[in-house]
Image: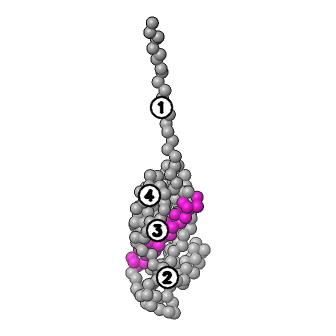
């Protein structure tokens, strides 16, 4: 828990300038098709001075973001994604310039291949930091955004990072390559030979 708290505190003071969009160009995910995605947040560590959020609020936000980004792929092979929220900090209103923390989240991700009945990855750690806009940079995230907006933004960042990560694994290791179709041999029927005609 101490390690998670330390990481949350350090990330909260960093900056992030790139803007993550809900609908970005799809990645090459081969034959990937999302069957189900599970999010868990019951054991998430809440960072210091963070706004409060319930586990259900977090699971709803994460599952919606994953469905948005990864539910659009319609390959021929099914995969499950499980995401555990390990820690978070939702920035409260602070003092601009002097103390202007950013919202952050840390998750562990599992990828399960349904067809082969095996995990492609277990407990892959991903850390995200909320996007910075001109408004949030000036006023501070806690002043510029509601808790719900912060959670939605972080959940989308998680989905974006997961999408980029599994696309990279597919490029390097062929995670979602099309598997060969195994042909079931036909049962051979007894052959009856006709007698020779005299």
**Residue placed farthest to the top in the image?**
198
Which span is picked out in magenta? 147-173
Q: Earlier in the sequence, mark 1 or mark 4?
A: 4
Residue at the (43%, 68%) spot, across then down: 25
* Mark 3 element type: helix
Q: Which residue is mark 3?
A: 159
Q: Earlier in the sequence, mark 3 or mark 2?
A: 2
Number of marks in the rendered image = 4
Task: Characterize the magenta stretch by its predominant secondary structure.
Answer: helix
Q: Earlier in the sequence, mark 2 or mark 1?
A: 2
Q: Which residue is mark 1?
A: 186
Q: Is residue 30 visible in this depiction of the protein? A: yes
Q: Are marks 1 and 4 in contact (CB under 8 Å)?
A: no
Q: Which residue is mark 2?
A: 17
In the rendered image of this protein, does residue 14 appear above or below residue 54?
below
Q: Position of residue 80 (x, y in %)?
A: 47, 57
Q: Is residue 41 visible in this depiction of the protein? A: no
Residue at the (53%, 66%) spot, across then down: 165
CA gap, disc 2 to disc 1? Answer: 60 Å
């Amino acid at each position: 828990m101490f390690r998670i708290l330390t990481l949350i505190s350090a990330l909260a003071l960093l900056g992030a300038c790139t803007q993550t969009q809900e609908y970005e160009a799809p990645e090459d995910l081969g034959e990937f098709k999302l069957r189900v995605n599970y999010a868990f947040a019951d054991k998430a560590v809440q960072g210091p001075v963070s706004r409060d959020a319930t586990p259900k609020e977090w699971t709803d936000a994460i599952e919606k973001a994953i469905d948005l980004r990864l539910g659009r792929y319609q390959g021929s092979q099914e995969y499950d994604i499980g995401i555990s929220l390990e820690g978070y900090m939702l920035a409260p209103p602070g003092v601009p310039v002097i103390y202007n923390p950013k919202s952050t989240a840390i998750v562990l991700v599992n990828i399960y291949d349904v067809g082969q009945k095996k995990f492609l990855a277990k407990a892959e750690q991903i850390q995200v930091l909320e996007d910075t806009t001109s408004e949030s940079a000036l006023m501070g995230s806690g002043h510029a955004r509601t808790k719900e907006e912060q959670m939605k933004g972080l959940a989308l960042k998680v989905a974006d990072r997961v999408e980029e990560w599994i696309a990279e694994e597919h490029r390097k290791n062929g995670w979602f390559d099309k598997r060969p179709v195994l042909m079931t041999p036909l049962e051979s029927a007894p052959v009856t030979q006709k007698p020779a005609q005299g």
